Amino acid sequence: MNYKVVMLDFDGTTACTVPAIYHAAQKMLGNHGYKVDKEIVYKNFALALPFAFRCFSGDDTIDDATIEQMIVEYNNIYKEESEKLVELFDGVIETLDRLKKEGVKVVITSNNVKPVLRRLTTNLNIAQYIDDIVSVEDVENVKPAPDIAIEALRRYNIKPEEALVVGDATLDMDMGRGAGCHLCGVSFGSHSPEMLRERGARYIIDNFSELQKIVLG
């Protein structure tokens, strides 16, 4: 076994959530008078919600109180309308099942919030393969800061080189690199393989199932 813990991003890495994010963001921001560019959402959906809404709207002057209200509205739309649009990428279930059987710990490390992640992993029938979730509620600084990865290392008392961070965005790579972990990018998410390699990705996979060989050797 090459790695004891896999730190797995969710949105854009484990599941295709961008259509769901776009639907909820477009509707919510539209209610506030903003027009949303689909391409901007597809390139920046990995941001934590306060940063995402300012990015999607093109308005970095939105105050914190308004952002908090937007988050409530967005989460309601996401739960009621968007979650049915979420699908796992090919190879996820069989890969997570194999890692579980081999004793590898799988930790979701995400800028999303726990209630959404728990609901989605349950709905997608992968909750039984997830050992832990480290998300925005657990740290002071979200991705691309290394805090989420550092917290996962602390929980499992392992060295950084014993953990593999898997993600689709440069902020995943920045987080993992900042914590000293090894990095694996996926080619089917928000950022190109070239961008991920520039941020330190040791591996690039085109299908989730390729993770098995990297992790288990």
Image: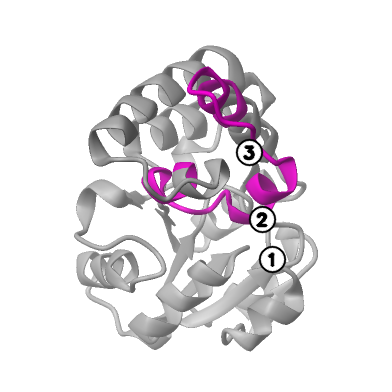
From the top left corner, tell me how far across and down residue 134 is, in percent: 31, 53
Between residue 129 and residue 84, name the one nearer to us: 84
Q: Which residue is mark 2?
A: 43
Residue beneath the point at 46% across and 38% down: 128
Front tag of 1 and 3 = 1
- Mark 1 and mark 3 lie on one chain; the one further toward the N terminus is 3
Secondary element type, mark 3: loop
Estimate the x, y position of residue 116 in percent, counting from the top left.
42, 31
Mark 3 to mark 2 CA distance (whole Å): 13 Å
The x, y position of residue 46, in whole percent, is 53, 53
Q: Quadrant of the C terminus?
A: bottom right
Q: Quadrant of residue 146?
A: bottom left
At a point 75% along the width and 81% down the height, the residue shown is: 194
Q: Amino acid at mark 3?
A: Thr
Q: Are marks 2 and 1 in contact (CB under 8 Å)?
A: yes
| Residue nearest the viewer, comparing 178 with 66 | 66
Q: How many marks?
A: 3
Please state which of the two labelled residues, at mark 2 or mark 1, is closer to the viewer: 2
Instruction: Specify which label sits upstream in the sequence, 3 or 2.
Output: 3
Per the rendering, the mark at residue 66 is none
In the rendered image, which quarter is residue 191 located in? Answer: bottom right
- Cα distance in 3D space between marks 2 and 1: 7 Å
Q: Residue at x 30, y 50 (%)?
A: 136
Q: Is the residue 77 above or below the residue 132 in the image?
A: above
Question: Badge 3 is on which residue?
Answer: 17
Instruction: Characterize the local packing of mark 3: few (<14), some (14-19) or many (20 or more) Cα atoms within 10 angstroms.
Output: many
Numbered disc 2: secondary structure: helix
Residue at the spot of label 1: 191
Crowding near pointer 2: few (<14 within 10 Å), some, many (20+)?
A: some
Which span is picked out in magenta? 25-53
Frontmost residue, 157 versus 8: 8
Q: Is residue 33 magenta?
A: yes
